[in-house]
Amino acid sequence: MVAKRRGPRRGGNPPLVWLDEPSSDLWDEDLSDVTKALLGSAVLCFAEKGFQATTTRDITGKVGLTPGALYVHFSTKEEVLFEIVRSGHRRALEALRATLPGDDPETHLRQVVAVFVEWHAEHHTTARVCQYELTPLSAEHYAEILDLRGQFNAIFRDAVGRIVDGATADQDDVSRLARSILSLGVDLVRWYRLGGTDTPASLGAFYADLAVHMTAAVRGRRPTSA
């Protein structure tokens, strides 16, 4: 995790903080440069220290602002976290939804898994915050994130169901398998770093192979009698 700074910029604007990952497409376009800079700084702080141990001074200090400047753009520190988590989930969902189901269920499952894994590898720092800093969210914000996470589950469950013959397979098995494959993609954010031997694309392809092999444990199984 490396923070790169640009600036200072003319007119008193703070230097932008760049993550060691392609983060320019994470934030909504209508946000100001200062807001985006604060979000990038907060991602680094939350990933390094955790939400509770991060102060507003930590976040604003990386972009050369005073602690009070945060509240010009966000009501609370929790709102900063929510914006990061919501944006991360939305961008990942957008990538997944671009993988429209084709005629071949195996190809579709491979595409879904590869896209999910590649996104989480490319945005591993932000994704780590999105996955492991949910507890501090308010009840209202947490409910919104749960809805987004449910949409991930639905996409994976549909992809798994198509390849294992979801009409006759044990539905509990389908759900378990979908969650297991999802978990593989999520877990990599704990250890992945750009610049290593594993590129996002190579990991995506490898995990896609794993997912297809995992479906063999469910294919052909039938629900047990009550």
Image (tube, rainbow, N blue to C red):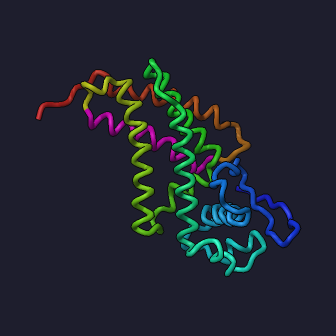
Vertically, is 37 above or below 61? above
Residue nearer the viewer, 3 or 64: 64
Q: Residue furthest left?
A: 226
Q: Is residue 172 magenta?
A: yes
Examine the rendered structure and indicate whether residue 191 appears above or below residue 109. below
Q: Which portion, as a residue range, is magenta?
A: 171-192
Up-down relation of residue 192 to residue 69 (above or below):
above
Q: What residue do we see at 45% from left, 64% from top?
A: 141
Name the residue furthest top: 103
The residue positioned 38% from the left and 33% from the top of the image is 158
Nearest the viewer among 69 and 85 is 69
**Which quadrant of the structure image shows residue 182?**
top left
Residue 206, image x, y percentages: 56, 30
Secondary structure mostly seen in magenta is helix
Q: Position of residue 3 (x, y in %)?
A: 75, 59
Q: Residue furthest front?
A: 30
Residue drawn where x is 86% and y is 64% of the image:
7
Question: Residue 5 sits in which quadrant?
Answer: bottom right
Tell whether position 16 is magenta: no
Residue 31 spot, x, y in % from top left: 66, 60
Q: In the image, 10: left or right of 65?
A: right
Of residues 5 and 75, the one nearer the viewer is: 75
Q: Which image quarter is the C terminus in?
A: top left
Q: Is 6 on the left or on the right of 90, as rendered?
A: right
Whole-percent x and y of residue 61? 74, 74
At 41% from the left and 29% from the top, the residue drawn is: 214
